[in-house]
Each structure stands twice: as C-alpha cells, then as structure tokens.
Image (cartoon, rainbow, N blue to C red):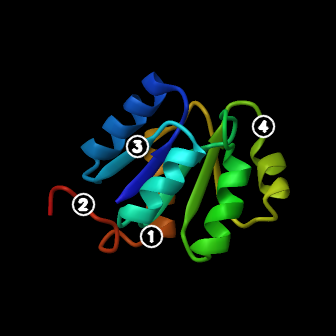
Amino acid sequence: MILLVDDEERYRELIARVLTKAGYEVVQAADGIEALSLLEKSKVELVLSDILMPALNGYALVARIRAKWPNMPVILTTGFLSPDAAKTMMNGSVDFIPKPINAETLIDMIHRRVPPGQVTRTNC
C-alpha cells in the first residue's frame, strides 16, 4: 500500500487515480499528522509526500518516519524546490520528484524503491 500525503485535495486525488490505475492500493492523508496516524494502523510499503504542508510538513514527517520506521521508502515532492536542493536538505535519505509529477517517472521510482511484487497491488 502506498501512503499519499498532500494538502492539495485535487492534486492528491489526481495522483491517487494515477497510482490506482497503475494497480496500486493507495491510502490518502491531507497532512503529516494524518499520515502518521495512518502509518500506525495501515500496512504501508512506501510514502509519497508533498514537502510544503500545514501542521506537519514533509521534512518533519520524514524525521518522524525515520525515528519509528527507519527503512520505510519515502518519496518527497514539491513544485517549489529543485531536486538537488531537496536531496541536499534530506541528506539523500529520500527520493525526490518535482511537481508536476510525470506518472511514468513516478511509477518507475516506486518500482526502484519497492520491488513490484512487494507493493500491495489491487489487480493481483
């Protein structure tokens, strides 16, 4: 299952549809606090999160994920930073994909972080 975290509901719904169409089970959160709650009660294999969000931003979310789930694959996204800047800020501990997200690039990135057979797929 992929946990998709973004405060922009329309964008989150769009990316969720792309992932679902690609065969993935997706659970959604509107911010980092909701994401942490879902991580506690769902079998999440990968987190895809926006960086700039109210309440708990993507950087703070990654810090909490690393403290409790140190091996959880995380992909961060934003339209406001370059990929190099985002990677530098996170010391290379996460992948980064800029917005607007290219669906094919995102799916390839998910496959690299979590092998296809390991991620919960809805069409299996």
Q: What crowding class fits label 3: few (fewer than 14 Cα within 10 Å), some (14-19), or many (20 or more)?
A: many
Q: What crowding class fits label 4: few (fewer than 14 Cα within 10 Å), some (14-19), or many (20 or more)?
A: some
Residue that carries the numbered disc 2 in the rendered image: 121
Element type where label 2 sits in the image = loop
Q: Please tell me which of labels 4 and 1 falls first in the chain.
A: 4
Q: Please tell me which of labels 3 and 2 falls first in the chain.
A: 3
Element type where label 1 sits in the image = loop
Q: Is residue 122 left or right of residue 89?
A: left
Q: Please tell me which of labels 2 and 1 falls first in the chain.
A: 1
Residue that carries the numbered disc 3 in the rendered image: 28
Residue that carries the numbered disc 1 in the rendered image: 114
Q: Quote the CA–CA distance across marks 4 and 1.
A: 25 Å
Q: Tell me whether the residue at label 2 lies in contact with that at label 1, contact meaning CB atoms closer than 8 angstroms.
A: no
Q: Amino acid at mark 3?
A: Gln
Q: Amino acid at mark 4?
A: Leu
**Can you give x and y, in whole percent of width and height, for residue 96 in the image?**
66, 51
